[in-house]
Amino acid sequence: MEFGSVSIANNGNTILGTGSIKNISSIINELKLNNPLICTDQGILKIGLLKKILEEFPDNSNFTVFSETPENPTELAVKKATSIYKKQNCDGIICFGGGSSIDLGKAVALCCTHNQPLEYYITQNNGSSKIGPVVPVIAIPTTAGTGSEVARACVLILENGQKRIIASPHLIPKISILDPDLTLTLPPHLTAATGMDAVTHCIEAILSPVINPSAEAIGLNGLERALGRNALVNSFNDGSDIDARQDMLIVSTQGAMAFSKGLGAVHAMSHACGKNPQIPLHHGTLNAVLLPTVLEYNKEYTGSKYSRISKVIGIKDELSLSEYFLNLNNKLGLPPNLSSMGINVSMIEDLSTHAVTDMTSMTNPVQMTKTAYCELFKKALKK
């Protein structure tokens, strides 16, 4: 492990620190990879960020690149990447990019070792029990939001049009590298959107009724780091703030560790909105926009948890959490409501049908119905 890097215990093995990308050569050798498939996206290629990882590869090593990851990963893209993996005789996967590239890579790892369509493995179909060992996965995030690099789940748009979760301990990457240097080029709007994704993970995990004090404590620490210490706003205001960038990478992994408790209605609604390929909406942005509406709805069902959250992020008692996040979204330049993102009233019926069957809805503080989701979507249209 390179000097300056720190190995930390998360769901899997994680290396954290400025310059920690230099560990990729030893990791490739350790996992005995001779031709890994690098799952990334066109944005990474355009800004030249892929060079940062390739220049650290072992001398004369082989690799294959799949760079067609959509903003919201699809089963179609997974099939295409899987075909390339098999055709090129690859022997492992390196996910390099945001949460979409990591989720896609994890799904490819599944499809390279399992033969059923992805719908067979979704959580609604008890998919976890059907998933065994997959090919080795290395995750290297270039954004600080999803925490997919330490999570057991991936989220995909299936060929039937649904956006669903596939989860198994086998999908946790073997090793993850958290190098804040790789996030320095992230523009302010994506810094804000991905950061709010991590924050929403922490909040919904804390509010989940599932009893897991350790996960809840991790979520509270993530909120204190992101909002109490201002890492999110500082990284948004100054993208070169390496300390804030590293803190947000930590928050991202903490959010994913925390949501072992489950998530809630924000994610159920976000998944519903994000399934339409004709309106490619960013998941973190959706979470940010939906969060105030859902917080207002859930308040009476969460006991003292709102007070604990308010305390760690340092807001005054007279300011509600819903108002706080409305103000924060405005400060971060995020959309004010769903209408401004292209969602309209005619979509609500379909969105609510999808949301109420989403697995994240199961751990909302109060049981959700389709009628309740219809009302929440209406409010979020004009919040």
Image: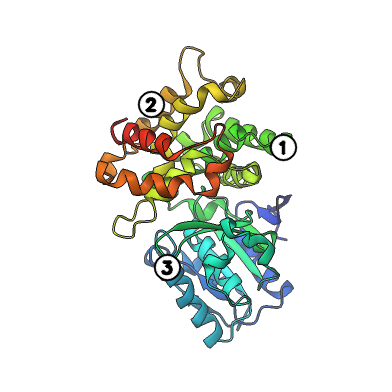
Q: Callout 2: helix, strand or loop?
A: helix
Does residue 193 appear in this view? no
The vertical placement of 338 against 14, above or below, is above
Q: Amino acid at mark 3?
A: Glu
The residue wearing badge 1 is 212
The residue wearing badge 2 is 327
Neighbourhood count class around disc 3 (C-alpha, 10 Å): few under 14, some 14–19, many 20 upward: few
The vertical placement of 352 against 135, above or below, is above
Residue 97: image location, x then y, percent:
49, 61
The vertical placement of 168 against 91, above or below, is above
Q: Residue at x 60, y 70 (%)?
A: 110
Picture disc at residue 324? none
Neighbourhood count class around disc 1 (C-alpha, 10 Å): few under 14, some 14–19, many 20 upward: some
Residue 88: image location, x then y, percent:
54, 86
Nearer the observer, 116 or 15 = 116
* N-term mark: 3 or 2: 3
Residue 321: image location, x then y, percent:
48, 23
Q: Amino acid at mark 1?
A: Asn
Residue 43: image location, x then y, percent:
38, 63
* N-term mark: 2 or 1: 1
Does residue 151 appear in this view? yes
Nearer the observer, 57 or 173 = 173
Q: Amino acid at mark 2?
A: Asn
The residue wearing badge 3 is 159
Distance from the alpha carbon under mark 2 to that under mark 1 = 30 Å
